Each structure stands twice: as structure tokens, then as C-alpha cells.
Amino acid sequence: MNIQSLTSDFYSNLQTFETGNHFSFSEYFSIPCSEVCSLAPTLPDLLCYQHISVSAPFSYTLSHVQTYCMLLTTRGCGQLEYQEQLYTLDKGTFVFLDCSQLHRICCPRGRWEYTICFITPPVTAFYYEQCCPEHNCVFKPDAYSDLNTIWNQLFKEIKDDKLHAILRAKTLTQLFTELYLIRQKENSQSFHTPAYLLDMKKTFDTACEEPFSLEEASRKYRINKYRLCREFSAHYQTTPLQYLNQVRIQRAKELLLTTDEKVCDIGQLVGIENTNHFIRLFKEKTGVTPLAFRRETPILDSDILN
């Protein structure tokens, strides 16, 4: 399929259309991404995209168009009727739609702004089946999702040549993957842990004695420190510093029972330079001071280390 056949199919299968706006569907097809689509049999690609702004009343009903579209609400609110379900498309709501299926898109009140794109069908069909089981095509990503970043990147690669077609295919595959992970999180309450969080946790687990600050971590992973803290907390149910302190105290307990090191030296060995702070933190986590722990804990009772 190319942009001409998409446009022709769209108009010939448009069942109803209502608007009180100065709006024409030609806007949908005014930014073509690939006239030739030579890579379509093997890679997903955009056919066209557009940023749309409409106000009520606005609606259209469509079916039997052999392509897929994606839609993201950026402001206001719209509605989607699909598979006998009515979905509210408020800000941040993402839609991955099979245009061969009967659907109605509308703005029932106020103003609605959204970005829409149409995608070549051969490879996209596989991803649609994985991301939208039983045609469950509406996604509401949380604050930790990279969906918006990937979506915006997609529209920076709009040139009609082989290189940019491959770059779009790469970004579309990332987008499909993110949608799949969002769906898996919804279905199983488990979700993908980003590599930078795994690396941070591994550093805590293996080198707790190293100094740590959110500012340095932010520079290392090139992620805002507040987002970094929120995402770590969402994945591990504790803040980075709280987790690191847990690891440090666990390591300190082991050293207290297996070495003759002084309390002040053990604090430094686990990365806590200030002895008074180490003692306060140890008592806060265990209920006793380091010396009391060493004195009162039976060495053979390995359960105390867990």
C-alpha cells in the first residue's frame, strides 16, 4: 500500500462524517512519509501522519481499510467506539487501531487535539496481534513509560529515502515493544526493568562501599534525578538510598560477626564514613547498636544474617 491507495480506500470506505470545523481529511494524508514503501513487505513503515485539532461536533465512521493507525491525544478529550466498546481518549491516551475493523472516532464536546499516523500493514499485523489481544487497542501509559519519547522520535525521521525508512522501522519496533510491555504490565502486574535501574541495583549489591548521590547517578545515566528516584521506587518499592542503606547494614552485620574490625572501621568498609551516623542507622534498621549486635548474636545462628 502507498499513500495514494490509502487515501482512495479511506474515502471509499468512509461511512459517516460530521464536522462543524474547517477540517478536511486531506490533512490526514498531507505529510506522506514514503511514496514508494519498497521496504513494506519486510519492515513496518509510516504512510503519513498529522497533528489534528478539532472541536465538537466532529466524528467519522470507517471500516475495511487495510492498514493500521496510531493515535495519541495531546489535549482535550475524544472518544472511540470499537468492538462494541466506548473508550474515552483523554490526554496521554494511546490507540493502536486496526482500520479494517468498524470504528467511530468523535469529539463529543469541547476541543480535542491528537496526533495520528497510518502504518503499512504486512508486518504491523503481527505486532497488533501481540499488543492488542481481543482488539484491546487503547493504552494508558504511566509516568515511567518511554512511549511519548519514542512517539516523538518517530516524527523526526520523515524523509523519503532508504536510510530514514530503516530508522522509522527501528523506532516503530521500539514503539510496538513498549506497547507490548505496557499490556503485559496491565495483564500480569509485572513490567520491564530498565537497564539503568538494573545497573544501579547491581552497583549497590556489589559495591555498597562506594559513595552515592542522585546527582552523580543522574549524570551517569543521563536521566533526571527525580525521575530516577521515582522509577527505582516503582520497581523496587524503596528509594535508591534506602535500598543502599539496607545493603550496607546487611554487609555490616556480616562483618560484625565474622571479623574483629572496630565499629568505626566497619562503618567505613560499608561506605558510611561518619561513625555516629553509622551507629544511628544500624540501630534504626536492627533495633540494637553494632556492639550490642556483635555481643548478643550467636555466631552459629546464620538466620540473623538474612
Image (cartoon, rainbow, N blue to C red):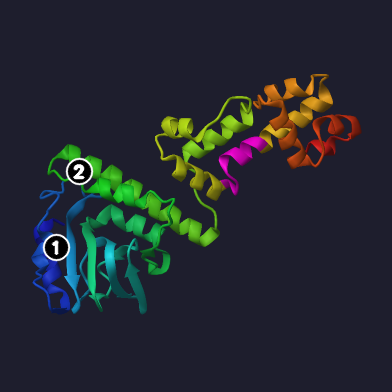
| Crowd class of label 1 (few under 14; some 14 to 19; many from 20; radius 10 Å) | some
Q: Residue at x 12, y 60 (%)?
A: 29
Side of 174 relative to 266 (left or right): left
Nearer to us in this view, 149 or 118: 149
Residue located beneath label 2 in the image: 157
Q: What residue type is labelled 1?
A: Tyr
CB under 8 Å between discs 1 and 2: no
Side of 159 relative to 99 (left or right): left
Nearer to us in this view, 295 or 29: 295
| Crowd class of label 2 (few under 14; some 14 to 19; many from 20; radius 10 Å) | some
Q: Can residue 298 be seen in this view?
A: no
Q: Which residue is drawn at 25% across and 47% down?
A: 154
Q: Is mark 2 on a helix, strand or loop?
A: loop
Residue located beneath label 1 in the image: 28
Q: Residue at x 9, y 58 (%)?
A: 30
Report x, y in % for residue 99.
25, 67
Q: What residue type is labelled 2?
A: Glu
Query: Is the residue 140 above or below the residue 292 in the image?
Result: below
Report x, y in % for residue 217.
48, 32
Query: Is the residue 272 above or below the residue 134 in the image?
Result: above
Report x, y in % for residue 113.
22, 65
Q: Give the range drawn in magenta.
A: 236-245
Nearer to us in this view, 99 or 76: 76
Q: Is residue 101 visible?
A: yes
Q: How far apart are marks 1 and 2 (CA)?
A: 18 Å
The quarter in which the C terminus is drawn is top right
Report x, y in % for residue 128.
35, 59
Give the overall secondary structure of the magenta segment: helix
